[in-house]
Image: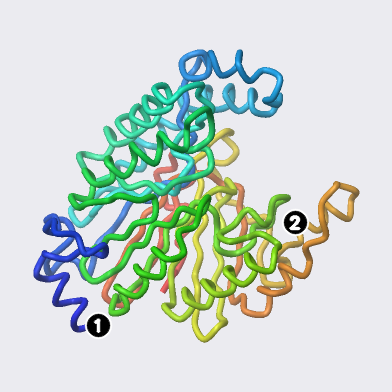
């Protein structure tokens, strides 16, 4: 499909990225679609205090298996959602303007760790309604994260429930956790990085070749993250098969000059990379506001020469981390921009006729904290 065909199909309102028979909703077509905005949220880890609301039986049944760190997450999330996250969401809601099309959330919508399917489904539903309630009826789209499928019968529950909810939000049939949609002539492809459906990703890429911009939504980043679990990325395994798949899709995304929107690592990271015959720009976002100090945007690492060094310095200081310098070195030559910040907040994607930017608002800051120029 060439660009003219893609635009024609989009304009008629009869074809979405998944070739759905549903008409495109009003917010996804029309002359205004060349310039629009989208509210972006990173990980949210929705939870409440006390932990017994969602985790009571899980704590009893899994007491011998779960770590103190996991229990600490329940306390962290409950405290965070008492005050800071509601403030963050209210601030994000003020970013909604007449041209705002939807809200996109980068996975780990919830903490998970429930003891049965019913409780897990309720946690997902409660999170959707709690967050959607701030955004004036805008469609709310989420991509699956690792926490979203963590717990007893959690994965099966998510796979049964969330495609149904995404169908309601997008007004088109969604049957998988890897799916596509469009806003005007821009393609959005949501990937399940936990269980990559390579055939579906290839199909969506093939069907959207004429798109103006290609946005890849994935919870786990495409580029190795400068953290201990640096391989927890899209096709990040060290096996020959995983390495081949990682490089294959890196090339496929680069040829589309893809813009990757992701989360998982609880930082605000920006990467602009050239290679494989094209360009990939990745924005990693987080809305897990655990401390007031994260309300200020401060860069802790930047530049191609420092990519991967946060992790490497920890290894050199004696932490039990595998030497992954070769993995980071594979990407370093193509880096044009790289910044890493522990700031948490909300984000606004601005898509114009000539430029794409992402505005970052740390915590509940009223003033713009930083603008990232994507295109």
> Please, what secondary structure does the residue beneath circle 1 have?
helix
Q: Residue at x 51, y 13 (%)?
A: 52
Quarter of the figure with the C terminus? bottom left
- Mark 2–mark 1 Cα distance, whole angstroms, equals 42 Å
Q: Quadrant of residue 273?
A: bottom right
Please tell me how crowded label 1 is: few (under 14), some (14-19), or many (20+) other residues with Cα within 10 Å: some
Quarter of the figure with the N terminus? bottom left
Q: Quadrant of residue 204?
A: bottom left
Report the disc number at residue 3.
1
Please tell me how crowded label 2 is: few (under 14), some (14-19), or many (20+) other residues with Cα within 10 Å: some
Report the disc number at residue 194.
none
Q: Residue at x 53, y 13 (%)?
A: 56
From the top left corner, tell me how far across and down residue 97 is, in percent. Answer: 22, 51
> Please, what secondary structure does the residue beneath circle 2 have?
helix
Q: With 100 as the anchor, is 359 left or right in this view?
A: right
From the top left corner, tell me how far across and down residue 264 is, in percent. Answer: 55, 48
Q: Which residue is mark 2?
A: 310
From the top left corner, tell me how far across and down residue 22 is, in percent. Answer: 13, 56
Of residues 79 and 157, the one nearer the viewer is: 157
* First in residue order: circle 2 vs circle 1: 1
Q: Residue at x 46, y 22 (%)?
A: 116
């Amino acid at each position: 499909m060439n660009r003219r065909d893609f635009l024609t199909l989009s304009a008629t309102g009869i074809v979405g990225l998944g070739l759905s028979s549903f008409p495109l909703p009003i917010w996804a077509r029309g002359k205004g679609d060349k310039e629009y905005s989208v509210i972006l949220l990173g990980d949210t880890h929705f939870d409440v205090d006390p932990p017994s609301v969602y985790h009571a039986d899980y704590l009893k049944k899994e007491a011998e298996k779960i770590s103190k760190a996991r229990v600490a997450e329940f306390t962290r999330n409950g405290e965070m959602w008492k005050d800071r996250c509601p403030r963050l969401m209210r601030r994000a809601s003020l970013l909604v303007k007449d041209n705002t099309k939807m809200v996109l959330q980068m996975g780990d919508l919830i903490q998970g760790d429930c003891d049965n399917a019913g409780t897990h489904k309720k946690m997902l539903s409660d999170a959707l309604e709690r967050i959607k309630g701030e955004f004036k009826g805008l469609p709310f789209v989420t991509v699956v994260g690792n926490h979203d499928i963590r717990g007893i019968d959690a994965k099966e529950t998510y796979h049964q429930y969330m495609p149904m909810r995404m169908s309601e939000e997008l007004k088109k049939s969604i049957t998988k956790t890897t799916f596509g949609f469009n806003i005007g002539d821009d393609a959005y492809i949501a990937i399940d990085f936990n269980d990559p459906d390579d055939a579906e990703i290839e199909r969506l890429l093939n069907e959207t070749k004429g798109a103006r911009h290609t946005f890849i939504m994935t919870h786990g980043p495409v580029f190795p993250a400068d953290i201990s679990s640096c391989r927890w990325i899209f096709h990040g395994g060290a096996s020959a098969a995983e390495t081949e798949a990682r490089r294959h899709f890196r090339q496929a995304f680069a040829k589309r000059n893809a813009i990757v929107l992701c989360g998982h690592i609880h930082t605000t990271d920006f990467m602009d990379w050239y290679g494989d015959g094209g360009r990939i720009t990745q924005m990693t976002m987080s809305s897990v506001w655990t401390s007031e100090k994260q309300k200020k945007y401060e860069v802790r690492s930047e530049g191609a020469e420092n990519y991967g060094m946060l992790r490497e310095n920890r290894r050199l200081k004696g932490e039990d981390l595998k030497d992954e310098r070769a993995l980071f070195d594979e990407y370093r030559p193509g880096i044009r921009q790289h910044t890493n910040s522990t700031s948490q907040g909300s984000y606004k994607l601005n898509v114009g006729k000539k430029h794409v930017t992402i505005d970052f608002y740390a915590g509940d800051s009223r003033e713009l904290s930083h603008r990232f120029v994507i295109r």
